[in-house]
Amino acid sequence: MSQLIASGVCALGILGLFAFERNRKVRTSWALWIPTIWVLIASSRFASQWLVTTVHPENTQRQIDGSPFDALILSGLIVVAILALVCRQRRVMTILRMNWPILLFFSYCAVSVLWSDYPDVAFKRWVKTVGDLAMVLVVITDREPSAAIKRLLARVGFLLIPLSVLLIEYYPGIGQAYSLEDGVTVYTGVTMNKNTLGLTCLILGLASLWRLVHLFRNNAHKVRQWAAHGAVLVLTLWLLYMVNSATSLACFLLGSALLVALSLPGARPARVHLIVMGLVSVAVLTLVLPDVYVYIVQALGRNTTLTGRTSLWKALLGMDTNPWFGTGFASFWLGSRLDKLWSVFSWYPNEAHNGYLEIFLNLGWIGLVLLTVLLVTGYRNVVSAFRRDPEVGALRLAYFAVAVAYNFTEAGFRMLDPIWILFLFAIIAVPEAPIRRDPANIDMPAEVDRCSGDLTAVSSHVYEGTT
């Protein structure tokens, strides 16, 4: 099959998936496209990276300079998201007051910019991670939050999964690359490296499985939705096999087991606690008992150095950083430290491949303590959400557990990382009952309702700000 025909078939397939998923009875705000585009970028490539397909940057200066084109796109999305949130300010303020641990963590990240070696770069990166939170708020303050998260994940999955298959099979110059460490071919799809593609498959595969489990549990005879999410799940499993990312595969199996277990009759918070305790116990045993660690790693088909990660961790812990405050928000992998590490490791690492170590390097012990507060309070919020809404609560629990496990061998607690965005979605506390609308606005048209979040309202703000 030629590239042109394959591209046409892929385009028709994507349109078919969207048609099968369409539900005219459910209305979500047009503002939902803002976080959809944001997650699409976070789960694939920046706009500038579609033009330059080099897997690794040529020099460390690019890590500092960044891309003005990408910055313009991301800044525009953040501005429009904030305008949408202004239209929903009552709901947003209520949610923010309930989530002081998240605000405390973000505030400390902002303060840590002051002791960064590159405060301007650190501040720009902090703004991007605030964008992550803004996108989550746009989703959960939608007129129908449950439908909003379903549509967002479906839209991203329907686009990125088929496109990854197309690029790998018919556009190898874009969808494939060569490992600088051992020279073998790796499959990257719509992303820039195999680990990111594995993560994209992990989060989108769980989303499709979640929808299928819900359809099965409710004996729903919705053939079109069965076909759409079944097709995405099959393609996702094929991509996970091709990518051969042990972390993503293990986390996918973990999240899948959670979704299935929580869908069984009689699922209660007690079962949730047991499952999470089992996860934490396995993770701790893996780290403190060498025999258990070796057995699990070899069972996943990896060597006991976790493909060079243990050597990297040893080198990172031996570097001169402030143990209490770190190097400043998202500032460790810059300048002379990055030059030194790239001179030692031929595979050019730009992350610690451990989310907890990454937090320690950038934010120190204080950052780790605040992250622990996020995990503890977030878990409480997840369980509370499961009690109120078992369907969405099961997905939030799966993403929470997967994020905790994923960060043992990958750095996922960082800006514009899809696992970080979904972790925020999982842990954020929401009101138990919908906030009552202002009676004065009840009879107003939807396009001028300040609490509706409709894109028409956002557009009016944008127009007024440009005249």
Image (tube, rainbow, N blue to C red):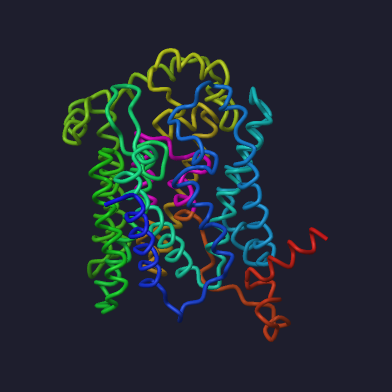
Residue at figure coordinates x 43%, y 57% from the top left? 156
Q: Residue furthest right?
A: 467
Q: Is residue 148 magenta?
A: no
Q: Quadrant of residue 141?
A: bottom right
Residue 284: percent from left, percent from top: 29, 35
Above or below, 424 against 25 in this view is above
Residue 289: percent from left, percent from top: 23, 28
Residue at figure coordinates x 60%, y 35% from the top left? 67
Residue at figure coordinates x 54%, y 44% from the top left? 47
Above or below, 442 against 455 in this view is below
Number of numbered discs visible in the structure rendering: 0
Q: Is residue 417 magenta?
A: yes
User: Depth check: 40 or 170 in front?
Assistant: 170
Residue 313: percent from left, percent from top: 38, 22
Q: Which residues are magenta?
A: 398-424
Residue 175: percent from left, percent from top: 36, 41
Q: Which quarter of the figure is the C terminus placed in?
A: bottom right
